[in-house]
Image (cartoon, rainbow, N blue to C red):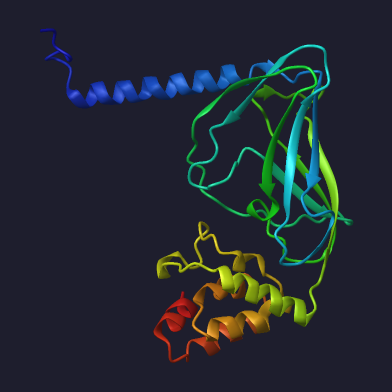
Amino acid sequence: MKRLFSQRQPLGVVILTTAIGFIQFLSLAEAAGHSRPVPEGARVALSFASGTNYVLGDVIELTFTLSNASAQTFQYETGGDYRGAGFLTRFKFTVVDETGVALPAETWMNMGGLSGLRQLKPDEEYSEALRLQNYVRVNRPGLFTVRVVHDFGWQATPAEPSPAAEGKIAIALPTPEQAEKRARAILADAKPEKGDALGAYWTKTDFRFLSHANFLPALERCAAEGKEQAMEGVQRIQSKEAALALTRLLDHPMTNVVHAASR
């Protein structure tokens, strides 16, 4: 039987050499994947599931569509971007108001995933449903331009940039009644979160979308009822009033509320 390793070659060296070789292979594969130019017929567009007028706290869902407007089939790459985050991180969002000020980007862990090439024939389309709040923190009202780009494994250049899809939306402040209704609707569907997940980037509760001061009274009431997930919204409100609300909740008789507020 053949020996797998030479007696003169320690196992650790073999493992390290193999790992380096694998990393080099991945780097070469990635480089090869980005050597394709941007196809001439590549076109992209955005469409919003619920129109273009929203209230802060609404979940904003949209569809990104890539189409082939040429007479030739082209290749595009997808995947490699969903583990850890739970959504597709190769989509890059920029959301700016009328003065050019951008909404802050959300954070996540990108652990890769399977990827591969696909073919897009003339007049065919590829679409993905996306949630705006996965990528940016929608924490103020205004008129916004949403810009979305995916590299698709193409080598973009100044002369041939990756196609960008754009759309405009309006986001209004909620009334106190709307804020209360939205918080209660989330509360009705809320699933229990482990205590150590509160405040972490991977938490999935929609309370984290209520990051404006208009939601603070409703969020504090929900938290005081023992629903600690509501503090995901409180802790994202950057104000003295939100800090005072957390301080008040530290005196709550329920231990889970005190624990969440202290985190």
The answer to whether 18 appears left or right of 73 in the picture is: left
Where is residue 115? Give x, y as percent.
53, 28
Asked whether the viewer can see residue 240, the reply is no
In this rendering, the answer to whether 20 lies above or below 90 is above
In this rendering, the answer to whether 79 lies above or below 62 is above
The answer to whether 81 appears left or right of 210 in the picture is: left
- Identity of the residue furthest to the top in this view: 1
Q: Quadrant of residue 70?
A: top right
Residue drawn at x 70%, y 80% is 180
The answer to whether 84 appears left or right of 134 in the picture is: left
The one nearer the camera, 10 or 237, is: 237
Residue drawn at x 45%, y 64% is 197
Where is residue 56? Give x, y as percent.
76, 67
Where is residue 21? Give x, y as percent.
38, 19
Residue drawn at x 74%, y 21% is 38
In this rendering, the answer to whether 17 lies above or below 200 is above
Where is residue 106? Give x, y as percent.
62, 55
Residue drawn at x 62%, y 79% is 219
Q: Quadrant of residue 8?
A: top left
The one nearer the camera, 84 or 59, is: 59
Asked whether the viewer can see residue 33, the reply is yes
